[in-house]
Amino acid sequence: MAMVVDAFAGKLVERLANVIEEKAIMVLGVKDDLQKLQRRMERIERVLKDAERRRIQDETVKGWVDELKDVMYEADDIIDLCMIQGMGLLQDDHHHSQPAESSAAASTRVRCCNFPLFSCVRSVPFRYEIADQIKNLNVKLEEISEDKDKFNFITSSSYNSSDAYVVNKPSSRQSSSLPEPDIVGWDIRDATKSLVELLVSPNEQKCRLFAIVGMGGIGKTTLAQQIYNDSKINDHFVLHSWIWVSKSSTSTTDLLKEIIRNVGGSYGESTTVAELQKILSNVLHGKSLFLVLDDVWGADVWIELIKSLVQIATTKCRVLITTRDRNTAIKMRAVHIHNFNKLSLDFGWELLCKQVFTNNDESDMQRLKDIAMQIIEKCDGLPVAIKAIAGVLLTKDRNKREWDNVLNCDAWTITGLAEELRGALYLSYEALPSALKQCFLYCSLKPREFHREELIHEWIAEGFIKPSGNALMEDAAKDYYMELIRRSFLQPNSSYVDMSTCTMHDLLRGLAQALAGNESFCGDLQDAPSTNSVQKLRHLTVFNERESLSIQHLNHLRTLRLVTPTSLNTQVIGSLKHLRLLILRGVGIENIPDSTGDLVCLRLLDLMGTRICKLPDSLGNLVNLQFLLVAGCESLHILPTSITKLYNLRRLNLRNTPLNYVPKGICKLEHLNYLSGFIIGDNGIDEGEGCNLEELEALKNLNHLDIKNLEKARGKHASVLSNKPNLRELFLNCTPNISGHIQQQEMDNIVQVFDELCPPPGFEKLVISNFFGGQYPKWMTSSSISATLSELTSLHLYGCSNCPQLPPLGKLPQLNYLKIQGATAVVSIGPEFLGNEEPAECAFPKLENLALVDMPNWEEWSLISGEEDNELETSKQLLFPHLIAISIQNCHMLKALPRGFNCIRHLYILSAHNLSRVSDLPTLRKLVVADCPILQCVEKLESLQNLKMTDRKNKSLPEWLISFLQQHIKPHDNLFHLDLRCSAQALKGCLKGRPYWCFLQQVPRLEAYGENGSMHLKYTKEPFSYQTNVVEDINCADDD
C-alpha cells in the first residue's frame, strides 16, 4: 500500500503531541526540536488532502508529495528512536541509583542495538546526534513547506469530518446495511441457461472449452458462478473445480494443488509440476470434470499445464474460462465464445436499487431516479462501478442536493490512471475517509483471499486504526472491515456466514496498486518493474516458488511478507531496520537471526506455520512489538524469557505450538488482550520454569484467553478470571489422559480448580477440553447459570469423560451453538439438560445448532420425564424453538430420538448403531444417514428435500430407504434430491432395468456413487438425463 499522505501526517502530528511530554523525551533534551517539527507538520497537513488528490495527475505535485513522504517516514522512525533511547537512558539512571545487580539481571535490560540511526551511545554526544537528526528534518520540512506555496493547494480546515472515521458513534456518513446480491436483468439469466445447455449437451468431443469474454468489471465472474452452481452442471459432472488464474498468479504448482484439492485428492508432500500432474491424472481417471478457469490472461495455463492431462484422464471434460481478451479464448480453441455485454441503464438502475434502497422505499426511488440514472450512465454499464458508486450513495443523505454533488464531483474526470480505473471506481475511493483509504490500499498487498483477523492485526500494526473512547482497536478495526464490505470494496466469501474471509475485485485491486505506485509490490520480485523502483519499496509481499529468494538492498522496507519461500537466507532480515511488519510463512523458514532484535520499530512478527526451532533472546529488544504470532510452529519448544519485556504486546498466539513451558513474567504484559496457548507449569524437564495461574491475574485487558494443562494449577485462583471485564472467549484445557487411570484425588483437585475459574459476566464463547472431574463446575450447574452465563452464545464441551450428567444448559438465554463431544460417562439425557428439573417457559430459547459426538454409552434421550405422548403435548414449556440442525455422530448405543423437535431443518446421523427409527419431523428438509445398521423406519418427514444415505458394506439398498421412497415421492415433486454412497453391488442394482430402478426412476434428482466415488450414476427425471460409468458384467445379476 502507499502512504495516504494526509492520513499519515495526521497520525504523525498526533504521535508528536503524545511523546513531547514523555520523560524519555525530556531526558534526551529534544523537546523543543520535536515541538518545532510538530508545528511545521500541522501547517503542511492543511494542504495534504488536495495534494493527495492532485498527485495522481500532476507529476510535479507527485514529486513534492514523494519528497514529503520520505521526510515523514524518517520522522516516524525518529519518534521511535527517541522513545527507545530515552527509555534506555532512564533505565540506566535508575540502574545507577540502585544497588549493584547480578550479571544475569543486567543481561535482561534493553541492550544496545546495531541500528546506525539508532546509535546506542548513551552519552552527551549521542544526545547531540539525535538532536542534529531532528534539526535536519526540520530544515528539510521547512524547504518542503516553502515549496508548497507554488502549487496553490486548497487548504482544508484542521479537522475535516470527511477524513475522520468514528466507529462508535452513529453517523449518516457510515453506510448502514450490507449490499444485496448483484444478479439483475434477464441477460445474465438467459446467458446462464444457454451456456448450461451447451455445456451439458452430448458431443463426441471428449474435452470442450467455452469462453466468456468481456471487459474488466462487466460481470464475467458472476455469470460463471451462476453456471457453476446450476443444478444441471452439478448433476452432469462427477467432479467440479473453480480456479482463479489471474495475471498476478504465477505459481503453476499452487494452481495444480488447488485443482487436486477441489476434486477431492491429496498431494501430500509433492512439490513439482510433474508430481502434481501425475496425482491429478490419477484423481481424474475415469470421471467427468467441469472446470472453471476464472480471469485468464494467457493461453499457456491451459495449453501447457492442463489440457493434455484432462483429455487423457477424464471420460468427459467441459472447461469454462473468463477472460478480457478474445484472442486468448481463440488461442485456447474455445468452441463457443460468449461476449458479455454491458448492463443497460434499466438493469443498472435495478442493481443500484438493490445496493442502496435495501428497504424498498418506492418514494425515495422515484424521487431520486432522474439523478441516479445520470450517475449510472457515467458508470458505463459496469456492475463493479455501479456497486462502488452505490457504496458512496449509501453514505449520503437521500436528498437531491447530496446525490447531485456525487453526480457533479470532479473525481469523475480524474486523469493519470488507466481508463478502466477512472470515473466511478476512483470517485468511490475518493469518497472514503482517509483512514479507510489506507486500509483499502493495504489490501492490495494481500493474496487473492484474505482473512479478517489477519487484516485487522496488520492494520493496527501499521497504525491505521484510531478507536474512539474506550473501544478496543481490534473492535474498531472490525468496523473498518465491515464498512469496506458495505461500500463494496471487499467481497465477502459466502461460505463464511460471519464474513470472516474476503476477496477484492481485480479492478479494485488494480486501482489500489495504481494508487500505491512504486511504494508497494505484490508478486514475484523478478517481475518487479525496475531495480530502482524495487529499492524504494516500502511494502513488499512475495509469492515465491523459486529455489531461493534474495531480498537484499531493500533498505526502506516497512512491511515484508514472504509466503512459502523454498529457502531464504534470513540473515539479511536484520538489516531491514525500518520494518514495522515482518510476516514469514511456510516450512522453508527454519530460523530467524539474532539480529531480528535490532528491528526496534517492529510492531508485528508473524512466524506461524514455520519450522523455526528457536526464537533469539534479542526478541526482548522489540519493545514496540504489538503482535507475536508463533502458532503452529511444530519445532518450537522454548520461548526466550526476554519476551516478558515486550510490554506493548497486544496479542500472543502460541496455539498448537508444542512448548515445554511459558516463561514466568507474562504478567508484565498488561496490554495483552489476546493470549492463546498459555501453558500451566512445565514438562517435568524444565522444573520450576513454567507459569501458574497467578500470572494471569494482572492481565485485566484480556478478551481472548486459551489456557492449557490446567491439571497442573496449584493454589487459590478465585480472581484470575473475575477481574477481566472484557473477556469474550475462554478456552479451558486439560492434558488428554492417555493411560485412562485417574486417581480420585486428581478428579477432586481439577473440580476445585474449575470451580474457581468462574468467568465474568458478558463473555460469549466457552470451550472446555479434556476436563476429567466427576461433575461440571458449580458455575455451570447451579440454578443461577442463566445469570452467570447470560451472554454465552457458543459452548463446546470436549472430552469431559467422567461427568455422567450434563449441565442445565437449556437455561442459557443466548446460547446459539452447542457441541458436546466425548462425554463417555453419559448414559441418559433427560429433563435436567433442559433446566435442572426446574423448567422455564422456554428451554434453549436461541439454540440453532446442536452437535452430540463420540458418546458411546449414551442410550436414552428424553425431553419430558417418561416421554409419554400426552405429557409432551400438554407441556407448556417451549423446547428448542429456533433449532435448525442436529448432528449425532458415533453414538452407538442411542436407541431413539425424542419427540418435540418441531422446527429442525437439518439432521445428521452418523454411526448410531442402535437407532431404529427417524420420524415425526414435519419441518425437516435435509437428512444425512450413515452407518446405521438397524435403522428400519424413516417416515413422516413431509418437508424433506434432500436425503443422503451412506452404506458401503451391504450389497443391497436398505429396506427403510425403499419404503420411504415409495411413500414420500409424489408425482409433481421436483425438489427432492437423493444422494447415495454405496457398495459397487448396490450401485449396479440402481441401474436402468435393474431391481431398484423402478423406485429410483421416480426420484427427481439422483446421485449415486460406489467404490469410494470411482463408480457413479447421475439421473435427472425432468428434463431427462441419465449417465453412468458403471459397466455391467455378465455376472451382475448374481451380485444383487
Image (cartoon, rainbow, N blue to C red):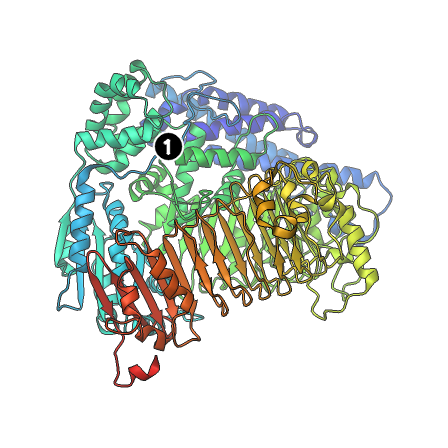
Residue 779 is situated, as x and y percent measured from the top left of the image, at 74, 44
* Side of 1034 where 115 appears, left or right: right
Q: Which residue is mark 1?
A: 487
Q: Residue at x 41, y 17 (%)?
A: 156
* Side of 269 where 391 appears, left or right: left
Residue 750 is situated, as x and y percent measured from the top left of the image, at 78, 55
* Side of 324 where 526 appears, left or right: right
Q: Give the camera-side residue of 43 and 946.
A: 946
Label 1, residues with CA under 10 Å away: few <14, some 14-19, many ≥20: many
Q: Give the camera-side residue of 490 and 914.
A: 914
Residue 115 visible within the image? no
Q: Give the camera-side residue of 890 and 938.
A: 938
Q: Residue at x 29, y 15 (%)?
A: 400
Residue 1 is situated, as x and y percent measured from the top left of the image, at 41, 40
Label 1 element class: loop
* Side of 165 where 1025 appears, left or right: left
As drawn, 357 above or below 863: above
Residue 182 visible within the image? yes
Q: In the image as oriented, which residue stretches furthest toward the right?
A: 99
Residue 1015 is situated, as x and y percent measured from the top left of the image, at 31, 73
Q: In the image as oriented, which residue stretches furthest toward the bottom?
A: 1035
